[in-house]
Image: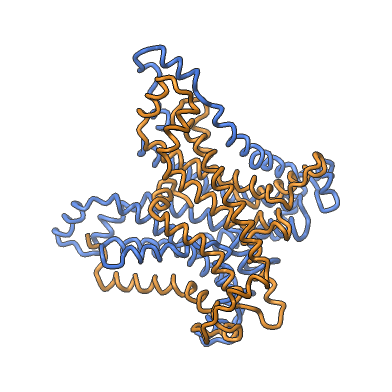
Amino acid sequence: MTDVKTQPPATTRVAGAPVRAGRRHRPLWMLIPGALLTLVVIVIPLLTAAYISLTDLDQYTIREWIRSPFAGIGNYTEALTDSPLLHAVAVSAGYAAIVTVITLPIGVAAALATQDKFRGRGLVRSIFLIPYVLPAFVVGTVWRVILQPDGVVDGWLGTDRTLWLNGPKSFWALIIVQTWASWPLIYLLAVSGLQAVDPDVHEAAALDGAGWWAKLWHVIFPYLRGPVSLALVIAFLHNVNNFTLPFVLFGIPAPHDVETLPVLTYVESFQNFRFGLSAAMAVLSLLLVAVPIVAYLRAVRLTTGEES
Amino acid sequence: MTLLPRPLRAVVLVVLLLLVLFPVAYMLFASVSSDLSVAAGHFWPDRFDLGNYGRIWSTTPLGRGLANSIVVAGAVAVLCAFVSLLSAYVLVRFAFRGRLSVLRGLLALQSVPGTLLLLPVFVLFSSTATLLGIQVIGTRWALFLTYLTFALPFSTWVMVTYLRGLPRELDEAARVDGASSWTVLVRIVLPLSRPGLVVAAIFAFLLGWNDVLFASVLTDPQTRTAAVALQVFGSTQEGGAIPVYGQLMAAALICAVPVVALYLIFQRYLLSGLTSGGVK
């Protein structure tokens, strides 16, 4: 990676003295506050989670959690064979994938539509970011009232007491609300991709008499591939890890059809007090996000390469 | 350049604006309507009554929640920006073993699910009471420590991106002149990186303001944040005879205003921070 290159190799320096002084004065201690916090609040808890997942920790043993009975891989086998975990994985992955796929054309279309100058464009761009800016707990609270039985959506559809927040339709309610809240992320990264488009190339294509769709497809979209695929990975991760929206929208215990992985892990800990089982579920949920995280790291490595 | 034919562009813009504004307008309208009208599913308000904005303060402990949120998220924002600057300065200007791993770690840590950390953080914080006699759970310190740490990876990444864009000649000249690293950082780098610091601080603030997961477990009714106060208020509406929808929407709006205001004021900075970091 290029970060090393931002620092010229010591051998290229002219004099020896500044190099030695530079080495001696590297203020590595400045990394300590961040490292210490990360160690105490992230690394040690991660290890603790792994340990708890191997014990039978419950509300009776929580005070003396280090001495709670060892359960081996019992929690893992229970999570995989005799718990709603696999169902929750399916719900989470399914809804995250569907939302990501729906938001892609919306975000790209919005970016294309705001690319040309027109009166009020600044205002439109600000408005487009509102769903993304609003806290998820506010979004959930508002949509909960909108989607209630006999609420405003029911009134417009002319239906009677539809259960959007319970039963099979709740899955689609979650998709609708999360789509509403998350498409601006794709839009933002598509806008940044469009800034790289070379106007000359675009004009040349226009002179060749290419139609607007042909121009988009052959000239514009290749510029968007990088930023938009990055956006897709990030969007998927956000959707999978999203706890607040389902939690506020449906409450807990969540309806079966929207029992996502984060909500299930939460309920298992703080409603059922099966801490060991919950930790095992959380550790397993890392597997679900591991693939997109690795893809993300690879994608970003390329962008840092261009920067320096 | 013209990317879309004008009629198509108009359709896209109008449809998206309507979709975005509908829930926002609904929140505004419902907050001034009667609860009966909201319960009956009317979109347009049946009256214009700002009374909900006054009543809300005695119905729920929203005021205390807002105060807690401002104190915690504000302190997190200031400290996080500074700690991020410290780390980013070293990461950008000095070569050391493991630098690449740290940078990669910054990105990876942003994607660790909060639910994986919630339980162990809760357990570890509770043990400080039994082992050291220090009560952390239920205090604002618990939230402060948690948010500060969770905000660090992204804020540091923002600062790394920002500092890379600063000419290194300025601070290197000062170093050659014999200034200590601390002096260089505080006198030269810090004033130059103000826009980056603002972005880092705002994202840290938003993380604290928006969190429900940790606040719902680590706080007690006295230290509850606005997010949890609103969530509890919303979920207790179902049991009652006539839910006070108007007040609920007024409360939601009040919780949204500081965030929206921050975005509008610092929009330009924030967007560059967002796209350079590539993440929310």
Q: Is residue B31 visible?
A: yes
| Placement of A181 over or under A150, stated as above or below | above
Q: Quadrant of the N terminus of chain A?
A: top left
* Residue found at x 50% / y 28%: B182
- Name the one closer to the observer, A89 or B276: B276
| Placement of A101 over or under A72, stated as above or below | below
- Name the one closer to the observer, A296 or B270: B270
| Coloration mode | by chain
Marker count (numbered) = 0
The quadrant in which residue A159 appears is bottom right
* Residue found at x 66% / y 54%: B214
Q: Colour of chain A?
A: blue
* Residue found at x 51% / y 79%: B29
Q: Left or right? Give the position of A111 relative to A215.
A: right
Question: x, y percentage for residue A134?
Answer: 51, 63
Q: Quadrant of the C terminus of chain A?
A: top left
